[in-house]
């Protein structure tokens, strides 16, 4: 029947998702038979439908195509074929991959266009000598959700491209967005960062929550007046508008734009008109595919005119977003309407893992190990991560790590701060909090990354600034505000109230800036530092604002006196007024102040100015105390507990067991060269490094080498630990490493090493009685039947029994594209959350639509498919009837569900004309996803070769006798694209019927599972309306009452075996791992 279809009838087949199973292919096993009569009836209906569609086109009433597309279809078939052939000879535009992510191309019509806008992206163009683009394509996914260094990176950071184009280029910036809702979200963000919170634009002078009741009333700033002052351009009384800085254009498929509707598409040059240097390029899409299935955005030169004075079309660029945003096709078109340049942009924007803060020497490694370093965190000091501004191509934006009693608090961290610190030998567990001064992109870009990494941290900001941060990143990421608040602990910084933090005291005040911004002083013992934040310390401007009644006398005096207050170190910003302090004002300060002042937020200082830039780097950390001045002692329970909490299973202990653990642990000091853990005790002693660094040395060596180079082998920095493999999942640091039996662990830092030690016999006793997770871990031995009975195993096929016999859950997690990127500890904890194996017989439901969300599953063997529940209650069994036997053969009999299947397919034909215009696009991408998942399911039955590093950490690879190439599971780009498509299907509540899931796939309605938990734990959201999360029409996730499943999932033809993860254990785990929650949220499947 398939072979009888005539174009364009076949074009509509992809719109009927039920029909792709009728493919008559001898080599295909994933099909369903129907009898010939039903097939012919279906074909007849399709032809009638095609005839109706053709009539609609002739009348100009087609809902799916505008008049431009109709012009194309009015051409003869020969003319269309000629254009498709000529299309492959259009010269390809050179694509420049940018260092921080994104692609830049140069067009003759409008200049540079860039796809993707990661933080500090304009610096890439500057360094490469390229013009900073005016046009930017905003990715469909505006945030990176991949586990790794780039998790949480904003891929639509439009602030500085807009500022550069406006203030430097004297023009606006153009953003090309996926849809109108994306534009609304970006406008919402820009309003917040450009003008400040809504309350101050509506006349409210200040937020009472920001100030202590005892704070002097006349010293409270009138933020409404101050922010309004900065909204006026120098020398003008008019306020600039958002549209002065940024414009929008969206992709459209209908005749919504007159310019698009009345003009033809750009076309390939006619045969013979191609350049003599033109070479044929193999393209994924034909010209017909691009203009009929892609959504289009047309960009004109700056004058905005589409017709020139000579009556010809102006040069322009047409950008086509292909179905699902998988690719963007760019046409560079001349005045003769010829396509003179072509670019194909991958819709998946990958941020390179090797990112670092500008100014640091090496790129972060991807080994998962902390780099060797002799850095010892100071008891009170500061590490400068960056001292420049957003327009400096060679410098990083200003940010710091404030060290208090050996623990770090990040201040306005630049992007990739954590990866850079890790590469410098600093364990991320040492960073316990963030201070955010304000919500401009050059100050908050790295904060979102940190709150998603590892355990929950403390987030310090005034209530106003904190609300702006949540508002901004909720709009950008599409995540509900309640979920963002849930990922960390907010401690409000109150003006006029001392803030106690880890043995230090902080004093906050509002600086003078275009949006709410804080300055603060931090005191520890008799030492102190002061940070101005972004501020305008310009006496003439302050006096002018005071005379205009914008500043009270108390407020003006406080601003003028901030830099004059006594402190040991002063970090003062400088830049271009009116938003920043002129450098000349700092040069006028008394010499005594300049001697302790470090300039930040500026690219360079003129010679002879008497000022110095803040030194960047770990090695240049500023210390205000001697190493011996530690306020923490060996009786300090907080430090010991904080260190021990990083070790698997310990943080899950109850109060009494935790107290017993603290009583068993003891702190010891070791001088340089002393043995911390002898090789004979590597498995008998848990050793957590508090301060200093350790390495391995052959036990036969008596002296420590004095060379500056470190000994070879593993290294332990502050926050890392050594012990048996079950408590140290990183084998190279454990008692099972290759050197463990022959090498001692020795102290090699100059100041020696301080460590927390505990005998494993004591720790095992505590864990066995107090940790459910540890006892679960003991059951994870390879081949364990877990909770399956002999009868259940006897009822299974040999395929399932074989998989169960060789099952090792940590190994199985390596088959999952997201979970294999978990840290060693995260993966160890996650594996222990299971409550055993469960077998589902063929077609048995794993969960049912409307049922309670109680479990998540990891597939061990067999297949699982989504089953669409129709309104009449009929559950289509199409997917569950697929056969995935290794030697599958064509079925000779008619399937029992075929007749019902045929009726459903015929009904789909009748309903097709009522579908939304985008249905064809969605179905095309759905078909691709379905084929990839089927291919994976087939490969899941082939022999698997595991290159075993150790039984707990394996490097999994597929090897097929028929195909030596890597399969999709080894292709991270394909995995990421599959995951993104599944997420979009879930968000849009699309029919996922027919998707086949196999070994290593994770299934779980995590957003609904976590919904009520978020409601219970987030302050300020205690409303009965909060229960689970789902996207609104604007594309933003919201919380609502429905916490039941919205789909049904069934076992495949041969049934399936899964690992069960109950919500009772999974939810507490996600509580403590925001990065995992962020990766699992808003989807039901992870490939």
Image (cartoon, rainbow, N blue to C red):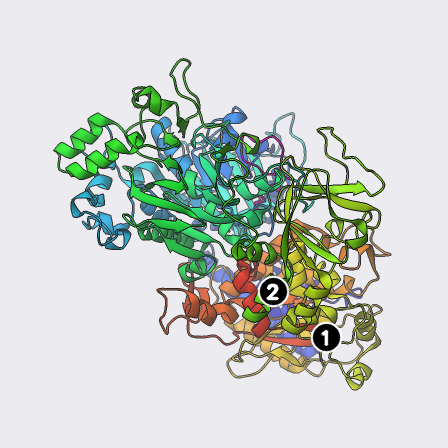
Vertical placement of 660 versus 689: above or below? below
Tell me which corner region of the image, top left, top right, bottom left or bottom right, holds residue 686. bottom right
Q: Is residue 341 left or right of residue 714?
A: left
Q: Residues within 10 Å of mark 1 (few under 14, many from 20)?
A: many
Q: At which x and y percent is residue 273?
A: 59, 29
Which of the pair 858/643 is nearer the observer? Answer: 643
Q: Is residue 360 magenta?
A: yes
Q: Which mark is residue 1085?
A: 2
Quadrant occupied by the C terminus: bottom right
Identified at 75% across, 61% down, the residue is 811
Element type at mark 2 = strand
Locate residue 990, reporting x and y percent.
Answer: 52, 67
Magenta span of residues: 346-364
Of all residues, the one furthest to the bottom in this rendering is 791
Tell me where residue 894 appears, x and y as whole percent.
Answer: 74, 80
Check disc 1 and report the residue beneath it: 1056
Question: Nearest the camera: 562 or 187?
Answer: 562
Q: Residues within 10 Å of mark 2 (few under 14, many from 20)?
A: many
Q: Nearer the viewer, residue 886 or 759?
A: 759
Q: Secondary structure at mark 1?
A: strand
């Amino acid at each position: 029947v398939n072979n009888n279809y005539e174009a364009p009838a076949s074009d509509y087949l992809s719109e009927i998702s039920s029909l792709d199973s009728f493919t008559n292919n001898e080599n295909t096993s994933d099909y369903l038979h129907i009898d010939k009569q039903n097939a012919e009836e279906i074909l007849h209906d399709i032809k009638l439908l095609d005839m109706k569609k053709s009539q609609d086109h002739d009348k100009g009433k087609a809902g799916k195509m505008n008049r431009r597309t109709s012009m194309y279809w009015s051409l003869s078939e020969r003319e269309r074929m000629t254009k498709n052939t000529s299309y492959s000879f259009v010269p390809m535009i050179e694509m420049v991959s940018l260092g921080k992510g994104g692609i830049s191309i140069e067009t003759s019509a409008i200049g540079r266009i860039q796809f993707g806008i990661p933080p500090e992206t304009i610096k890439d163009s500057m360094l490469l000598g390229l013009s900073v683009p005016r046009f930017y394509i905003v990715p469909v996914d505006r945030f990176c959700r991949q586990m790794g260094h780039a998790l949480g990176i904003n891929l639509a950071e439009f602030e500085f491209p807009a500022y550069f184009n406006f203030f430097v280029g004297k023009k606006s910036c153009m953003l090309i967005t996926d849809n109108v809702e994306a534009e609304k979200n970006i406008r919402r963000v820009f309003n917040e960062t450009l003008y400040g919170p809504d309350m101050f634009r509506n006349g409210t002078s200040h937020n009472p929550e920001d100030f202590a009741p005892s704070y002097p009333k006349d010293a409270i700033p009138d933020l409404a007046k101050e922010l309004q002052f900065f909204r006026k351009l120098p020398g003008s009384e008019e306020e600039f508008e958002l549209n002065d800085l940024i414009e929008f254009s969206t992709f459209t498929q209908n005749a919504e734009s007159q310019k698009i509707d009345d003009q033809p598409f750009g076309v390939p040059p006619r045969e013979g008109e191609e350049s003599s240097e033109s070479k044929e390029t193999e393209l994924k899409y034909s010209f017909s595919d691009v203009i009929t299935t892609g959504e289009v955005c047309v960009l004109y030169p700056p004058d905005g005119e589409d017709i020139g004075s000579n009556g010809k079309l102006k040069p322009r660029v047409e950008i086509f977003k292909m179905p699902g945003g998988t690719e963007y096709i760019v046409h560079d078109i001349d005045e003769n309407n010829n396509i003179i340049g072509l670019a194909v942009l991958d819709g998946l924007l990958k941020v390179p893992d090797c990112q670092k803060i500008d100014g640091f020497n090496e790129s972060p490694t991807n080994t998962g190990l902390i780099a060797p370093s002799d850095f010892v965190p100071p008891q009170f000091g500061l590490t400068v991560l960056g001292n420049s501004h957003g327009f400096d191509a060679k410098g990083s934006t200003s940010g710091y790590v404030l060290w208090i009693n050996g623990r770090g608090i990040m201040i306005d961290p630049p992007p990739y701060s954590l990866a850079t610190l890790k590469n410098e030998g600093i364990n991320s567990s040492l960073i316990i909090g963030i201070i955010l001064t304000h919500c401009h992109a050059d100050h908050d870009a790295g904060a979102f990354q940190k709150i998603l990494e590892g355990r929950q941290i403390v987030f310090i900001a005034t209530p106003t600034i904190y609300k702006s941060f949540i508002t901004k990143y909720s709009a950008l990421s599409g995540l509900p505000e309640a979920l963002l608040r849930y990922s960390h602990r907010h401690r409000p910084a109150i003006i006029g109230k001392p803030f106690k933090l880890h043995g230090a005291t902080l004093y906050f005040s509002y600086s003078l800036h275009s949006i709410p911004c804080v300055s603060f002083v931090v005191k520890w013992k008799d030492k102190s530092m002061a940070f101005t934040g972004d501020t305008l310390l310009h006496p003439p401007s302050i006096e002018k604002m005071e005379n205009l009644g914008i500043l009270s006398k108390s407020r003006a005096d406080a601003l003028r006196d901030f830099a004059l207050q006594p402190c040991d170190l002063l970090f003062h910003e400088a830049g271009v007024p009116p938003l920043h302090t002129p450098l000349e004002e700092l040069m006028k300060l008394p010499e005594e102040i300049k001697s302790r002042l470090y300039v930040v937020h500026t690219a360079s200082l003129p010679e002879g100015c008497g000022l110095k830039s803040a030194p960047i780097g770990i090695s240049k950390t500023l210390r205000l105390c001697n190493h011996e001045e530690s306020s923490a002692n060996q009786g300090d329970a907080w430090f010991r507990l904080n260190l021990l909490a990083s070790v698997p299973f310990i943080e899950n202990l109850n109060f009494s067991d935790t107290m017993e653990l603290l009583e068993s642990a003891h702190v010891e000091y070791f001088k340089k060269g002393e043995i911390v853990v002898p090789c004979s005790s590597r498995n008998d002693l848990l050793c957590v490094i508090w301060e200093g660094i350790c390495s391995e040395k052959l036990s036969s060596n008596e002296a420590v080498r004095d060379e500056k180079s470190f000994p070879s082998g593993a290294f332990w920095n502050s926050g890392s630990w050594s012990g048996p493999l079950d408590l140290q999942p990183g084998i190279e640091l454990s008692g099972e490493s290759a050197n463990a039996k022959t090498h001692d662990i020795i102290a090699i830092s100059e100041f020696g090493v301080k460590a927390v030690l505990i005998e494993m016999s004591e720790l095992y006793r505590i864990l066995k009685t107090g940790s459910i997770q540890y006892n679960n871990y003991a059951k994870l031995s390879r081949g364990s039947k877990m909770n399956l009975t002999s009868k259940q195993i006897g009822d299974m096929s040999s395929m399932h029994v074989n998989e169960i016999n060789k099952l090792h859950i940590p190994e199985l997690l390596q088959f999952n594209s997201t979970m294999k990127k978990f840290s060693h500890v995260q993966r160890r904890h996650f594996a222990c959350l299971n409550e055993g194996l469960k077998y589902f017989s063929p077609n048995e439901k794993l969960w049912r639509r409307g049922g309670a969300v109680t479990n998540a599953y990891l597939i061990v063997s067999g297949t699982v498919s989504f089953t669409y529940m129709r309104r009449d209650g009929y559950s289509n069994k199409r997917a569950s009837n697929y056969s995935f036997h290794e030697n599958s053969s064509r079925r000779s009999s008619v399937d029992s569900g075929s007749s019902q299947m045929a009726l459903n397919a015929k009904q789909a034909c009748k309903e097709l004309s009522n579908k939304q215009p985008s249905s064809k696009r969605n179905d095309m991408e759905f078909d691709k996803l379905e084929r990839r998942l089927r291919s994976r399911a087939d490969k899941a039955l082939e022999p698997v070769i595991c290159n075993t590093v150790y039984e707990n950490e394996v490097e999994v690879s597929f090897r097929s006798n028929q195909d030596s190439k890597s399969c999709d599971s080894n292709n991270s780009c394909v995995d990421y694209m599959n995951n993104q498509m599944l997420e979009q299907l879930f968000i849009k509540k699309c029919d996922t019927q027919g998707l086949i899931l196999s070994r290593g796939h994770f299934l779980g309605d995590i957003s609904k599972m976590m919904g009520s938990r978020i409601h219970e734990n987030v302050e300020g959201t205690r409303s009965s309306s909060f229960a689970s999360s789902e996207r609104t029409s604007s594309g933003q996730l919201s919380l609502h009452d429905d916490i039941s499943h919205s789909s049904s999932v069934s076992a495949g033809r041969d049934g399936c075996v899964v690992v069960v993860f109950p919500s009772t254990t999974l939810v507490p785990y996600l509580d403590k791992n925001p990065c995992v929650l962020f990766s699992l949220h808003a989807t039901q499947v992870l490939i």
